[in-house]
Amino acid sequence: MKPRVLVVDDSAFARTVLSRLLRAGDLDVVATARDGADALAKIDKLDPDVVTLDLTMPTVDGLGVLRALAGRARPRVIVVSMSSIETEIGAEALALGAIDLVTKPTAFASDRLNEIGDELVAKVAAAAEGFHAAAAALSPEPLASVLSRSVDLVMIGTSTGGPQALTRLMSALPATLRAPIAMVLHIPVGYTEALAARLDKGSALHVVEASEGLELVAGMAVLARAGEHLAIHREHGKFVARLRSHPNGVFMPSVDELFKSGAIAAGPHALGVVLTGMGDDGLIGARAIAAAKGSLITEAASSAVVYGMPRVVHEAGLGATSVPLEALAQELVRRA
């Protein structure tokens, strides 16, 4: 059965273009909505799997839709936003529960349509598949016993569903966490500074966007800047953030790049955590952590929005422990 999608945008042209792109990707666009009020009515009537949501609309805007949907398991919402004018509300939308974000150009130029379509179709399909996978997921395995070695550096990688997962995790961690945290999230350029600020407001930890030469200390969580790799180096006994702009694979920042650098910097005292996301970014880095005798945690299928990135690491035979998101903060406190 094809994933069922509701397209929400106050522009009739945008609704037409997005619907055509999604249908070309073998997705079932069950309806379109012109504003938030129209969207909520059609969500109640049609129960779609996924909603693509514009943010700036009359009557009820995108944030109003997300607030109205709070606590509901479906539909899953993917924001289609113009980052040049909507960065702050885009970050708020992610914090309110949107699982991913696609940046649209200010005008739907023909030379950008295929690029937008490929990304949007992939994210909508992953979101719908993740919903059905989570519904069928088995209970996670029991947590591993407390490790004898301490954790000096926690590294977290995530993609689709990551903003909400990080919001929940950061809000549950205490300021007394001894090991600093470095995080990579696949997100369009322009959103990480605002998202880091929102995470900081809701967390006892000090959450900041990564900057060159920043020292990572206890009580701090650093979010990689979109468009630049984050590497952690040990310099003069301290963990230091180094930013790199060289292309490496599909994603920048890359979870693999963070994990590989952390494996060198912290060795057996490195902990890599792979949360919800599609694809396999993080697998190569997880192998580096395992080779350095560090430890790994993957988010359990029961809580992951998309059980892609966690699954490939968990099934790679690297000794990763599967932990549902709601138990992850407690597990990090035990280890760090």
Image (cartoon, rainbow, N blue to C red):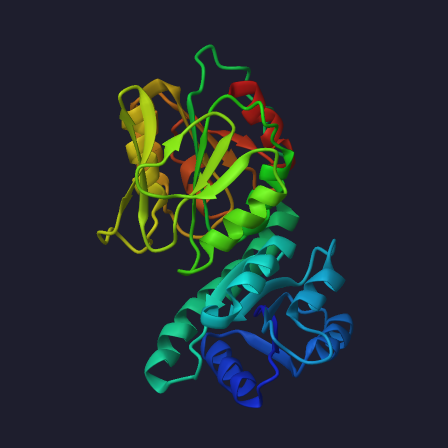
For image coordinates 34% across by 27% down, the residue present is 239
- Residue 285: name its quadrant: top left
Q: Quadrant of residue 250?
A: bottom left
Residue in view at x 33 percent, y 23 percent: 238
The answer to whether any part of residue 270 appears in the image is yes
Residue at x 38%, y 85% (from the top left corner): 109
What is the total number of numbered labels drawn onto the structure image?
Answer: 0
In this orientation, which residue lies closer to the viewer: 217 or 148? 217
Q: Quadrant of the N terminus?
A: bottom right
- Would residue 310 be found to the left or right of residue 242 on screen? right
Q: Residue at x 53, y 87 (%)?
A: 16
Q: Is residue 139 above or below residue 236?
A: below
Q: Tell which of 284 and 172 is nearer to you.
A: 172
Q: Is residue 298 above or below residue 335?
A: below
Q: Position of residue 300 (x, y in %)?
A: 56, 38
Residue 74 in the image: state x and y as whole percent.
69, 60
Residue 304: tell me if it is visible. Answer: no
In the rendered image, residue 82, in percent from the top left (x then y), is placed at 48, 72
**For the view shown, which residue lies furthest in the bottom direction?**
13
Left or right: where 276 falls relative to 77: left
Residue most toward the top?
Answer: 148
Q: Is residue 91 above or below residue 210?
A: below
Residue 47's spot in the image, x, y percent? 72, 69
